[in-house]
Image (cartoon, coloured by chain):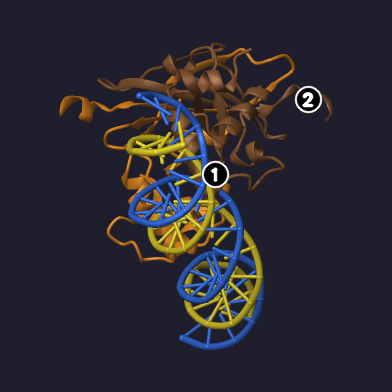
Chain colours: A orange, B brown, C yellow, D blue
Amino acid sequence: MITVEEILNAHDLRNTGCRKFILSELLKNDAALSENELKGPYPDLFDRVTFYRTLKTLEEKGIIHRIVLNDNSVKYALNRHHQEYEEMHSHFHCEKCDEVLCLSGKTKFEAELPKDFIKHEVYVVIEGFCADCVHQS
Amino acid sequence: MITVEEILNAHDLRNTGCRKFILSELLKNDAALSENELKGPYPDLFDRVTFYRTLKTLEEKGIIHRIVLNDNSVKYALNRHHQEYEEMHSHFHCEKCDEVLCLSGKTKFEAELPKDFIKHEVYVVIEGFCADCVHQS
DNA sequence: CTACATTTGCATCATTGTTGCATTTGAAGT
DNA sequence: ACTTCAAATGCAACAATGATGCAAATGTAG
């Protein structure tokens, strides 16, 4: 299992409290987490701006990625499987429990773009119910 | 050509200034428009809250739809071609000129969801360059 | 023309994204 | 272990956006 320190060192980032906190939370979770979900029971452990800037830094370094959902909310997830080099970013969002999962490599997409248009990236969000919410309903 | 009044009457909505303004702007444009793009040269024609509530009403009635882009910005477009009944909502976003176009019916998408997951809606945003921006670069 | 529900404008608040700046801190070198 | 300094943090502050309550204005049915 890769450690938080290894991730930070590999990207020439200092080993600071906020970075370690965010990365360890994301490593613990398979799902993507919002800022509040990340903070969890420690909402004031770090300043709001520090949190914001740390997430931005981690994103710029290609360690995490930002997922914007259809309701304008934002979640963050670790880049596993070299997602940073992929053109396709697809996620599942459960409408009931709000959980967000990465679906990298499990989606196919084709678009017939207007003439001369160029495609760089594709962002997909599938809304629906996750297995847990299907079973308990 | 369908008129603003016909749209409003068909949905049991009163023929008010803000509604007529927004709908006529959207009818004029093929592209999706942000709140500021809609307001254009008349930023204070209506109160901000009125604008906000009118967009919400039009969306709830299925007359327009909201497009959330990857940078958290929001645009609005008329529901043409009975888009309100479709499961797939795909849009193109030009990274250079910021124009957003609906690609309804021109995209195919398949996802291999985890076991027992249920899909309701699929939101796709393709980022890239539009034809105009490709030519002038 | 009247009546009344709907819509609007205004005040106000919450959340989120963002910047500048002074202080603190990680880690490299001695 | 100590010094040094760029990098990171905390704080103040501001902008944009989403949202609600309430009084005033307005569309439209009768």
Between label 1 and label 2, give the one nearer the viewer.
Answer: 2
Q: Quadrant of residue A42?
A: bottom left
Contact flag, marks 1 and 2 (Cβ < 8 Å): no
Q: Residue at 48% of width from left, 13% of height from top?
A: B82
Chain bearing mark 1? A
Q: Nearer the viewer, residue A29 or A66?
A: A66
Residue A19 in the image: above or below residue A63: below
- Residue B110 x, y percent position in the rendering: 44, 14
Marks 1 and 2 sit apart, C-alpha to C-alpha, by 31 Å
**Left or right position of A84 against A32:** right
- Residue A114 x, y percent position in the rendering: 68, 15
Amino acid under disc 2: Asp
Residue, disc 1: A62
**Left or right position of C13 against D16:** left
The quadrant in which the C terminus of chain B is found is: top right
Label 1: few (<14), some (14–19) or many (≥20) C-alpha neighbours in 10 Å:
some
Q: Residue at 57% of width from left, 12% of height from top?
A: B106
Examine the rendering and report whether any part of residue B29 can be seen: no
Q: Residue at 16% of width from left, 27% of height from top?
A: A137
Residue A110 in the image: above or below residue A29: above
Amino acid under disc 1: Gly
Label 2: few (<14), some (14–19) or many (≥20) C-alpha neighbours in 10 Å:
few
Residue, disc 2: B132
Q: Nearer the viewer, residue A26 or C6?
A: C6
| Residue located farthest toward the left when viewing the structure as drawn | A136
Per the image, label 2 sits on a secondary structure element best described as helix
**Left or right position of A29 against B5:** left
Per the image, label 1 sits on a secondary structure element best described as loop
